[in-house]
Image: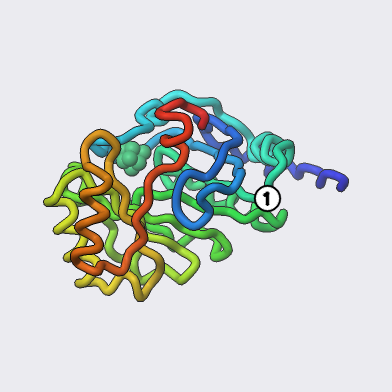
Amino acid sequence: MPRPKHDAGLLTTKLRVCEIFFSLQGEAARVGLPSVFIRLTGCPLRCTWCDTPYAFTGGEIMPLALILDKVRALPTRHVCVTGGEPLAQKNCLTLFTLLCDEGYDVALETSGALDIGGVDKRVARILDLKTPSSGEMEKNRWENLALLTQKDEIKIVIADRADYDWAAERIREHRLPTRCSVLLSPVQGAQNATELAEWILADGLDVRFQMQLHKLLWGNMQGK
Ligand code: SF4
């Protein structure tokens, strides 16, 4: 397939990129699918259990044209834009539309603290709800919930029983499973996975339990 020519805007519109890599999607509905990951630099949050603090600073400023070239060079139609917090850089909105226009299946992983309203409607939004243990619960932007559709997902990371109780309460209060899939994951090294699974079953909570596949396969290796 001939490559589309880059227009001037794609060369002058830029994003600060932490890394671009090819791996298996480790979470949510696309788990197990070979995917390109575009990890953008920067995040306004500081979750206590953040596993990507290396994405807070640094990275390389890249024109959108170069990012698209790197994506096209990899053998998959699945693209995950993650961070950091991708929405902290407004040019990511243009990137979403360009990727969707080229036929990619695009997912966004976002902290839930920023407005998702401007994201191209074709993008699947994986929205975090931050629990008490994260230290960032006050940043949850509850208005985002009304914008979610069935192709989106809500992810809640659980570090202890207090987080679980908080999550169960929010799930019921906002009837989250009627909006989209709700994912509960244990914080590796903090919350016992089996215990979390048992709590979900005991309460009959209408959620999907998940563990991060990439960590089971590769541990905390960066770029996997
Ligand atoms: S929102 Fe994500 S990237 Fe930002 S501090 Fe929290 S876990 Fe880390």
Q: How is the image coloured?
A: rainbow
Disc 1, ligand 1: is the CB inside 8 Å? no
Choose between 90 and 196: the one closer to the eye. Answer: 196
Please identify the quarter of the rendering in which residue 8 is found. Answer: top right
Instruction: Count how many numbered circles sit on residues in the image.
Output: 1
Q: Eyeballing the image, is 155 above or below 20?
A: below
Q: Where is residue 73 in the image (x, y as percent from the top left)?
A: 73, 36
Q: Position of residue 128 (x, y in %)?
A: 34, 53
Q: Eyeballing the image, is 43 above or below 166?
A: above
Q: In this view, does 129 lie to the left or right of 81?
A: left
Q: Residues within 10 Å of mark 1 (few under 14, many from 20)?
A: some
Query: Element under label 1?
Result: loop
Choose between 202 and 181: the one closer to the eye. Answer: 202
Choose between 91 and 73: the one closer to the eye. Answer: 73
Residue placed at 21% from the left, 49% from the top? Answer: 195
Residue that label 1 marks:
77
Residue placed at 65% from the left, 57% from the top? Answer: 100
Residue placed at 50% from the left, 37% from the top? Answer: 39
Q: Position of residue 136 (x, y in %)?
A: 21, 45
Tell me the amino acid under the disc marked 1.
Arg
**Outermost residue to the right:** 2
Query: Does the rendering let one see residue 44?
Result: no
Please identify the quarter of the rendering in which residue 60 is found. Answer: top right
Q: Is residue 51 left or right of residue 62?
A: left
Query: Does the rendering let one see residue 47?
Result: yes
Residue placed at 60% from the left, 41% from the top? Answer: 36
Q: Quadrant of ligand 1?
A: top left
